Amino acid sequence: MKKLANWIVAILFIICMFCIMRYLQNQNLTSVESETNEDVITITVLAGQSSSDAGIEDMIDEALAEKFPNVQLEWECVDWGEKFDTQMQVRIAAGDIPDIMVGKAQDIETYAAEGNLAPISTNCTKRIKEEALQSVKKDGVVYGLPYNVLYQGVIYNKNIFEHYDLKPPTTRKELEDIELILEKNQTTPFAAHFWESWMVGNMTMQFFMNDIFRDRPNWGDLFRTGEESFFNNNQMKDCLLQNQNILAHSWDDAMMIDQYECDQRFFEGEAAMYLTGSWSLQLINQYNENLNQEYGIFPYPNQKGNSNLLRETNMTFMKSSTTQYDDLIDQILEELVTNEELILDILDFTQAFSTIKGIESKYQRCIEEDVNWYEQNNQVMDVSTGNKELIWSFQNDLAVKQQEWLQGKIALEDVLHYADDQRMESSQ
């Protein structure tokens, strides 16, 4: 009986020890898991993306994973033209500014003025080309890290132009002659998509740059003081009429189609010209292998016949002035401008040009020869001039009104009066 009791005591002892060991093991695992979770730093990112940018977030995550294993970028990606400004204003009002923002150079004017951006470290800015830095300064301070450059103008099908013995126009009369020749030969002069307000706004600023801001870079300031207006300015009226001209010489359904449909038609040879930017070149890679078309670019002719090609500093990284991860974000941004493989991958993916010293894409873009010619001949303007004078929210609201006009719902005079009524909303 005593022997049996000893066995029972031994078994109970073993069970107790097993339970204690399991408890301690679980406690240790919980502690390790807690420590691991505490080591992960989440950086919030609001990315306002152009149509060519979607997907760069995955490329950046992959590039940063090895160097920053305990950092997680929490991305919120929205359409820059339609939602970025609205989302930023909502976040600012809620006191929830993202740690990092990815927008365009022109966003600096808006958000730096409100005190929501922190200066970019010199370790980053010293790697950026000076002309790109000029577009991200506010009162002499660099508040954005420009990552790539796009060019804006009329992309044209060289095969169609050669077939009809046409040359890129420099005057409005030459453009009208080209439109007439093409239509006589059942060829649509312009590819266009007026469904999205951002595209109408972009085209309008292209006209503004060469007809207004080229000669009067402070026109926006004069507009706000009442010295200038839309309604009493014939050049402004003419700029808006150029949207009507393109619509009149495009497809019947140009008011109803989006960028993807327009890009696809253009690169299938359904139109000769396309007032757009180099962001539309992404689709060329999918189609041009089989179609073997050649493309070039020229500036849309202004009234004086001296238009310049337009340069736009596009993808721009900004840092919150309230982030608790100031030093870490500086390290992340520095990695973005020193990781050559990542830089080249993003340049090729977005079909953009480099802003970073000593790094140029090895991929020859179909418009690169023309772009280089305009650059070498000092016939390029930076569109940031106009975008600082008339901020994007004003441009987009004006574009929405133009859509109504182009659909016949209101008169051109209504658009011009609307712009004048909103003059104090044209700057931050």
Image: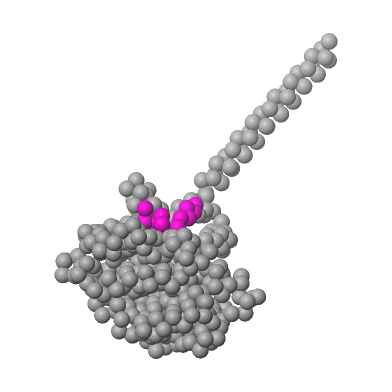
34 sits to left or right of 44: right
Q: Nearer the viewer, residue 380 or 276?
A: 276
On screen, residue 419 versus residue 359, left or right, reads: left
Quadrant where the N terminus lies? top right
Front-most of residues 7 and 126: 126
Question: On screen, 102 above or below 270?
Answer: above
The residue sitting at 83% across, 15% down in the picture is 3
Q: Residue at x 71, y 29 (%)?
A: 18
User: Is residue 371 in sight in this rendering?
Assistant: no
Q: Is residue 114 above or below residue 296?
A: above
Tell me where residue 404 appears, x and y as whole percent.
Answer: 35, 58
Q: Quadrant of residue 117?
A: bottom left
Point 27% across, 68% down: residue: 389
The number of callouts visible is 0
User: Where does the image place residue 116, in percent across and percent down from the top left?
Assistant: 32, 57
Task: Confirm whether the magenta stretch covers residue 75.
Answer: yes
User: From this viewpoint, which residue is outermost toward the front?
Assistant: 184
Q: Quadrant of residue 207?
A: bottom left
Extreme top residue here? Answer: 1
Q: Quadrant of residue 159?
A: bottom right
Seen at 36% across and 84% down, the residue is: 173
Residue 52 percent across, percent down from the top left: 51, 66
Q: Looking at the figure, which quarter contains the C terminus?
A: bottom left
Asked if the magenta segment contains residue 19, the reply would be no
Q: Which residues are magenta?
A: 74-86
Q: How is the image coloured?
A: one colour
